[in-house]
Image (cartoon, helix red, strand yellow):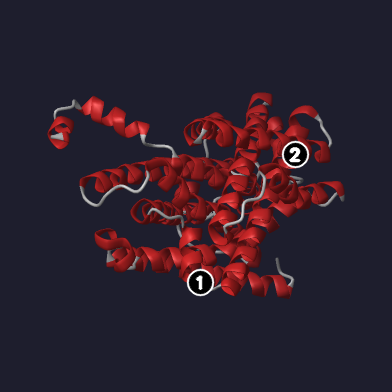
Amino acid sequence: MSTSLADQRSPFQRARSATVLLGPAFVAAIAYVDPGNVASNISAGAQYGYLLVWVIIMANVMAGLVQFLSAKLGLVTGRSLPELVREKAGRPVRLAYWAQAETVAVATDLAEVVGGAIALNLLFGLPLLVGGVITGIVSLGLLMIQNHRGQKPFERMITGLLGIIAIGFLASVVISPPSASGTLGGLVPRFEGSGSVLLAAAMIGATVMPHVVYLHSGMARDRHGHPEEGAPRNRLLRITRYDVGLAMLLAGAVNLAMLLMAASTLRGREGVDTIEGAHAAVQEVLGPVAGLLLAVGLLASGLASTSVGAYAGAMIMQGLLHRHVPLVVRRVITLIPALAVLAFGLDPTRALIISQVVLSFGIPFALIPLVRFTRDAGLMGVNVNHRVTTALAWLVVAIISVLNVLLIYLTVAGKG
């Protein structure tokens, strides 16, 4: 009866009911447009022009596959990825796994708080340390919305900030369109020296973010529950594909806009190897409105992404260790490294890029169990991965692992 009634609804009513179910992927997408992306993408465009356009496209496609598998895992099993890792691993492995995941969470927070501090400095001239403290306090306020009002209001708030980020970074491309031939040429995979490899790895580390791989599985489960096998589950999985597809399309467009703006506006200019320098150049070349929108987009990016990062960290700890740390305490602990970077006057843009390299090392620890679980027929039942899907997922893991090996070599050799 329920199926026949659903079939009698108009296409508009069906689309409207499906739209209401969108949201978790847009929260995850915030991690793909965080300040680390801004630093990596602007550096790539300013130093190498359109050379690394292909990296953004590849990273975004990989992220879409990974985020869908994460959401599917949560919907089908009714458990988050950290919870499943806990079930399958012994205590020493769980503790070691949590330690690396927590390191990734701290690196994530560093990038996002530093990015917010830079934005407040650009907008209001605030000292970076003061801006970092304000970013941490505001992000805590956003987390309180999730704590006291539930997941849906939090999703709406984060999606609104995602819209602001998109406007802030797409505006420059609209004001000064990039070269079409240069953009198309950048689709051909290639590198130019070790520096471009380091930036490519940082860009992938800033796009395929491990903490939201863990988070999305839990958010999808918490939002939609554990639907029974058959039509209800298939419908939610279909809607999840749209959710992930739309969110990744928006995040990919923003990332691409960052690089194209830098390639067309900042290429060959001196002093644009920092976000502050890039902002000054954009303001000089494209006008104060473009500079203002870029700074506002960066601020929204820092505030939203640090909130999502803290949310993910809490879910990881809860899932792996069954330990709950009060939100304020956790927020203060993860803020300390970022505030230390700002207090000691370290180069904030360089810190952002290095944080993305650290994140890149954490990606295999999230992806390998994700692929193993979603290809397990005993765990996933009829929703187990198709062989082609599993093969593509393992290819993603292999590409990132190879880049990590190159990163170790470049770092030890001092070529990064």
Q: Tell me which numbered mark, 2 or 1, is placed earlier along the sequence.
A: 1
Tag 1: Cα neighbours inside 10 Å, few (<14), some, or many (≥20)? few
Image height of 101 relative to 345, above or below: below
Q: Residue 313, image x and y in percent?
A: 60, 52
Q: Mark 2 touching mark 1, by CB under 8 A?
A: no
Front label number (2 vs 1): 1
The residue positioned 38% from the left and 53% from the top of the image is 78
Q: Residue 163, image x and y in percent?
A: 52, 31
Q: Which residue is mark 2?
A: 117
Q: Is residue 263 visible?
A: no
Q: Is residue 59 left or right of residue 9?
A: right
The residue positioned 66% from the left and 48% from the top of the image is 39
Q: Which residue is mark 1?
A: 89
Image height of 40 relative to 153, above or below: below
In this rendered view, identify the residue nearer to me: 336 or 160.
Answer: 336
Q: Residue 367, image x and y in percent?
A: 48, 64
In this rendered view, identify the residue nearer to me: 190 or 253.
Answer: 253
Where disc 1 sits, the SS reads loop
The residue positioned 44% from the left and 49% from the top of the image is 184
In this rendered view, identify the residue nearer to me: 183 or 91.
Answer: 91
Q: Is residue 10 left or right of residue 107?
A: left
Q: Residue 384, image x and y in percent?
A: 29, 62
Q: Could you tell me how far apart the alpha carbons at marks 2 and 1 are, in whole angstroms? A: 39 Å
Which amino acid type is marked by label 1? Ala
Which amino acid type is marked by label 2? Ala
The residue positioned 26% from the left and 43% from the top of the image is 235
